[in-house]
Image (tube, coloured by chain):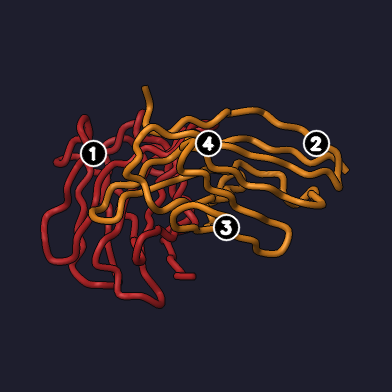
Amino acid sequence: QKEVEQDPGPLSVPEGAIVSLNCTYSNSAFQYFMWYRQYSRKGPELLMYTYSSGNKEDGRFTAQVDKSSKYISLFIRDSQPSDSATYLCAMSIFTGNQFYFGTGTSLTVIP
Amino acid sequence: GAVVSQHPSRVICKSGTSVKIECRSLDFQATTMFWYRQFPKQSLMLMATSNEGSKATYEQGVEKDKFLINHASLTLSTLTVTSAHPEDSSFYICSEKVRETQYFGPGTRLLVL
């Protein structure tokens, strides 16, 4: 079993839709949870960063962590064509240099 | 967030030559940096972890003599692909560790002919 599982998609939604992206994980020691957005031929860009359980909101983006279910989500409200990208989840333990990435979900927002 | 630059952004070289890719931290002192490679439509593959002033830690299956990593200062790490071959053609991305997260550079596209 992989440490982090992420549905690769592709996911296609109309402009203005609410998008839900998800990852599950198996290691209960993970404490830091990140979402990255990667445009084609570019490096990943950190979108959201949360510690432990709960919700965090930043503009149209909401990151949600449910540690009891080992499940994290990224919600995008009022999706725009510019949101079309691959979204990667990542997580880490408190100490050390190990990060665990999902394989990424490809999202297309259709105008 | 932190700002990481990479140079060059694209490089084309002949088979057998060596290519150096620079990764600079522009606003943090990066004790730890990471090097990844990414093939089209695939996820990131960690190659090595680079710590300032010490030898890099390579992931299993990554040849340390082929992919030379130097992290001589807190703002610069370099990856040298030695004796490059067409199968080394890929997208190489560096990142710096800032507290408990990573900030990535824009990537370097390497094409070996």
The reply to whether discs 1 and 2 touch (Cβ–Cβ < 8 Å) is no
As measured in the structure, the alpha-carbon distance from the residue carrying label 3 to the one carrying label 4 is 15 Å
Specify the amino acid type for callout 3: Leu
Q: Is residue B53 left or right of residue B16?
A: left
**Above or below — where is B2 with respect to A95?**
below
As measured in the structure, the alpha-carbon distance from the residue carrying label 2 to the one carrying label 4 is 19 Å
As measured in the structure, the alpha-carbon distance from the residue carrying label 1 to the one carrying label 2 is 45 Å
Mark 2 chain: A
Q: Which residue is mark 3?
A: A47
- Horizontal and vertical percent for residue A62? 65, 54
The reply to whether discs 2 and 4 touch (Cβ–Cβ < 8 Å) is no
Q: Residues within 10 Å of mark 2 (few under 14, many from 20)?
A: some
Drawing shade for chain B: red
**Residue that appears at 29% across and 55% down:** A94
For discs 1 and 3, the disc positioned in front in the rendered view: 3
- Horizontal and vertical percent for residue A47? 57, 57
Dot 2 falls on a residue whose secondary structure is: strand
Residue extending furthest toward the bottom: B27
Q: Which chain is orange?
A: A
Are the residues under badges 3 and 2 in a single subunit?
A: yes
Residue extending furthest toward the front: A68
The reply to whether discs 4 and 1 touch (Cβ–Cβ < 8 Å) is no
Q: Is residue B20 left or right of residue A33?
A: left
Specify the amino acid type for callout 2: Val
